[in-house]
Image (cartoon, coloured by chain):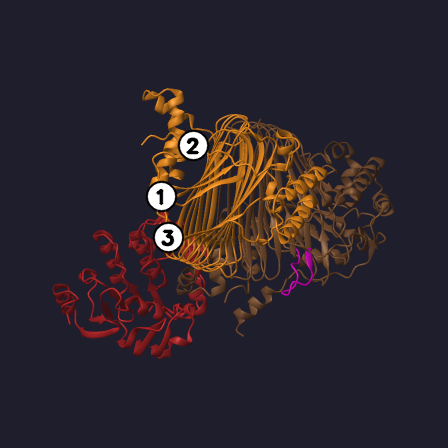
Chain colours: A orange, B brown, C red
Amino acid sequence: MTEKIKIDFEKTLKNSAFSEKDIEFKMKYLNKFIESGLPNRKLENWKFSDLSQIIQKNIGELSFYNDYSIQNKVDTSIFVDGLEHNKIIFINGRVEKIDFSYEDHNKVKIDDHFEFRAESDNNNSLLSLNNAFTNKCFRITIKKDYSLKKPLVIYHTTNNKIKSKNINLKLEFELEQNSSLRIIDLLKDESVNNFINIFYNFNLKENAILKNYKIDKILNKNIRYLFNNIEQQSNSVSETFILSSGSNFSKNEVNCNLNGEYSSAFVNGIFSLDNEQQHEIRTIINHLVENTKSYQLIKSVLGKNAKSAYQGKIFVDSKAQKTDGYQLSKAILLDETSEFNAKPELEIYADDVKCSHGSASGSLDENTIFYLMSRGLNYKQSKELLINGFLLDVIEKITDPEIKNLVKNMIGFKE
Amino acid sequence: MDTREKNIEQLKDYKYGFSTEIENIRAPKGLNEDVIKFISNIKKEPKWMLDFRLNAFERFKKLKEPDWQKPKYPKINYQDLYYYSAPKSVSDKPKNLDELDPKLLETYKKLGIPLQEQARLNGIAVDAVFDSVSVATTFKDELTKHGIIFCSMSEAIQKYPDLVKKYLGTVIPTTDHFFATLNSAVFTDGSFVYIPEGIKCPMELSTYFRINASETGQFERTLIIADKGSYVSYLEGCTAPMRDENQLHAANVELIALDDAEIKYSTVQNWYPGDENGKGGIYNFVTKRGLCKGKNSKISWTQVETGSAITWKYPSCILKGDNSIGEFYSIAITNNHQKADTGTKMIHLGKNTKSKIISKGISAGFSDMTYRGLVDINSKAKNSSNYTQCDSLLMGNKCGAHTVPYIKNKNYDSNIAHEATTSKISEEQLHYCQQRGLNPEEAVGLIVNGFCKEVLQQLPMEFAVEAQKLVGISLEGSVG
Amino acid sequence: MLKINNLNANIDNKSILKDFSLNINPGEVHAIMGPNGSGKSTLSNILSGKKGYEISGEVLFENKNLFELETQERAHKGIFLAFQYPLEIPGVNTNIFLKTSLNAIRKANGEKELDAIEFLKLVKEKSKELKFDEEKLNRQLNVGFSGGEKKKNEILQMSMLSPKLSILDETDSGLDIDALKVVSEGVNSLRNKNNSFLIITHYQRLLDYIKPDFVHVLMNGKIIKSGGPELALELEKKGYENFN
């Protein structure tokens, strides 16, 4: 891989207009990535899924070079119906459109090229890869006291022009005091066998509210990694919802630093997987000051050869008295070949805290199915009813009613 | 200072901290083939046993010391340790207690483990291990009547080579991890138990481990085999003198339960924890593993871990036989600068296997406590289940409590349920108890014992009382 | 027996009790009535030795300065508080708790500690008197007890420990009429010329069953009026708001 990546990197530099400073930055991270390579199961974080092997098996050799000079045509038929929204459209990793036409333009600032920021490095080799190859990094700032009128839908689309590619995206969101933002990431792929590596950084100032919804629903053969870093000042709220269902492999990471008092973070997720799919959610919630709160609820429904993993960590600093932290993960295994893994972890250094976690996994209750069937439902109906009931309370956690309905419709929940 | 305070002061001191002046035979310092041959030779071991050791040593040389655990420790120089130390008087094992060095008898008496006939603990047979060797086993005749073998490992290698050969290393192979492999190479003594088919062992069997010599590692090996339909309850206790240096204790314990057999293994670990500034104390890096080999077999681990500078161990069950049951009940208490990383592994391989984990962790002072556990239900382990409950209690905000469970379910008609909580003793609870006349220490002791109740209940009666006291003593000085 | 002189109590710079004075002689039953937030619970907390208050003034119990005594030492001297919200202590058997507590107090007073048999005999006797379900003595302390059971358990503890001064902090709240009767009978059976009671309550109804010798009305941290049992009835009729 090393030779190939170096060649692709040279090619990328040649065809772009990076400043010298940018190039220096990118070189540094390229070397860092080459040193550590793709993550594998030897790393604690990748214990349940070996990305290096998964890429090897599903893609083979990756190509890191992408031609961003050619504009792609935006297919408007993919737009979400019945929901007025702002848009960012990625096609094959290229930003084709940024549209905030519903908003006051003085209140939303878009920087299309700002100096790449070397984030607090956590030895994440995928971040190094991302830093080395990201074409453009956008920063979107929501000004003080402004709440976006409409949600922002980020379309992640790919088409069959790309194959065996590595695509790197990066977005930064700055939510100033008292501002609020709703984001929906919508994945739509027509390509196969690509590795898509996405980094989001959210910076929530005092009283800011972020609603962060990720919908991976449409079946596709891609491998996806999405990292969310969320920094929170006092009284800010972040809500992350992940529907993890479409991609062949997907791993969502949420790293949340509760830096200000009375800030709170919610992470809820659904894995609905079948046919060899393998998905993972990993969260780290760092309670760093007093009176912060986090809540996590993750549910899995797993079919044939499907595998899900939830690694959730609550960290409580010795200063973070009165922390309230909660995690619950539940899984239903539908097939003898399905597998559920969990590592719900607590690391606590303060004594006046309320922290707990729970995890439960098992099969559908045959007695309940029997009961439903005795009331006239067939087996399939009974099963679906139970699964929907199982998943419903995660969806009910979505606090935005409009988006809650959207998600319900997508999954096929009937009201 | 009133009398009660004085009593508490006395309790705070580690009362097993004395050492015995006794003449020793030691292997030369360091770890190499010659030392292993020395150990094997002094024990007059057969060749297969020496080969077992040398094999392990070959393997050991290729292994790297693990470093994933939470409590870190300064690098151990394995060449700077004595791997064999025995009181001179027992180098030829005395035939009866009259021949035993009075100093040894006195030591065990001081520890509350009288070995003499007239003063023996009621209903408990004791094997006393002093540094590297077993010095005495009580109630031998009584046990022999039932066909039960309870003796030192060295004796078993001589007298029951077929049993030892058949089972030794089958649960913890010589190719296992760093410390287990080291033990396979250099183990010195330990207990051997064989319960014949259909026999319910009429008394508690107990080994009492004592590290006395300085600069000595203790590497004992225990092997317990419960044949078909048999039952045994086994208890292990440990103490060590107070020394400024850290001492390594890397034992291997293997349990094998055949069809319908049950083994109950309880540990009250009270190794010297170091002083209140964290100087000295035992590194307790022990490998304990039980194999439920036969159908309907059951292995139950109960541990009360209050001592050691660092405790790093995961008593585990491999549930191979159909319908077999594994249990793990644990109380771990760390105070001052103690550290613990402990928990269990439940590996479900057979059908209808069940496991239960109840873990209670209490950290006080500057200490750090981690529960780490694995529940792994294999795809063939149909209709299996696990229930895990991990509760942590923190006293003060200079200590840490961590829960790291790994849960793997590969079987669709098996159930895993895991619950964990972290809490503290509330001011209100303390006030309530004090209003009823208890002093703060008594109040904390009472509340903590209540917190640990589900585990304390699992201990054999005779030791439950002792353990309850230990729980209270370990936390002295942690309130107020 | 108990002399409170100009007691002031603050919490977080908020003044709760202001120049509060009260004198209780042996054998007397005093009732303190007051609306929510008048300082009733603060009084019982301070008398039992709960930390967290800034205190000035003087409280003497049998002529000894109460503030020099730790909570448990006050219990040893014979002060008992029936908590408004009795605490749950998981894993601790009620019987064992009672025995530990009783013996701690006996020991402190130079009396012989009771052995298991003597204790069981006593607890059986007392449970019977108070109609306390003996089965509950083998359960974890207050865990899973109903509100009424918890309060009855407090009275059982009081009866077992035979204190000189019993402070009942809103013991009647959350009790149905039957439980109220049982609790009152328990208190009445302990009444004699040596034992005193301080009954803190919001409502008058408990005083139908336990006849107080004195009634004090507490408002904003001060006793605004003292009198005999008739004062409670007057208060009940008028309500706190119009009482002033």
Q: Give SS at disc 3.
A: loop
Q: Amino acid at mark 2?
A: Ile
Q: Residue at x 62, y 51 (%)?
A: A19
Of discs 2 and 3, which sits in the foreground? Answer: 2
Name the residue nearer the viewer: A264 or B158: A264
Q: Chain of mark 3?
A: C
Label 1 and label 3: CA atoms lie apart by: 42 Å
Q: Do circles 2 and 3 both sit on a common chain?
A: no
Name the image quarter holding residue B125. Answer: top right
Label 1 and label 2: CA atoms lie apart by: 22 Å
Horizontal arrangement in the rendering, residue C221 relative to residue B298 (left or right): left
Quickly name the residue at label 3.
C142
Q: Do circles 1 and 3 both sit on a common chain?
A: no
Of discs 1 and 3, which sits in the foreground? Answer: 1
Residue neighbourhood size for the residue with mark 2, other residues' Cα within 10 Å, grouped as few (<14), some (14–19), many (≥20): few
The disc, 1 or 2, on the residue closer to the chain's N-terminal end is 2
Label 2 and label 3: CA atoms lie apart by: 61 Å
Q: Is residue B272 magenta?
A: yes
- On residue A78, the disc is 2
Residue neighbourhood size for the residue with mark 3, other residues' Cα within 10 Å, grouped as few (<14), some (14–19), many (≥20): many
Quickly name the residue at label 1.
A400
Name the residue nearer the viewer: B58 or A404: A404
Q: Give SS at disc 1.
A: loop
Q: Quadrant of the N terminus of chain C?
A: bottom left
Q: Give SS at disc 2.
A: helix
Q: Amino acid at mark 3?
A: Asn
Give, as a single range, the part of the protein colored magenta: B271-282
Q: Position of residue A372 (x, y in %)?
A: 35, 24
Residue B7 position (above or below residue A315): below
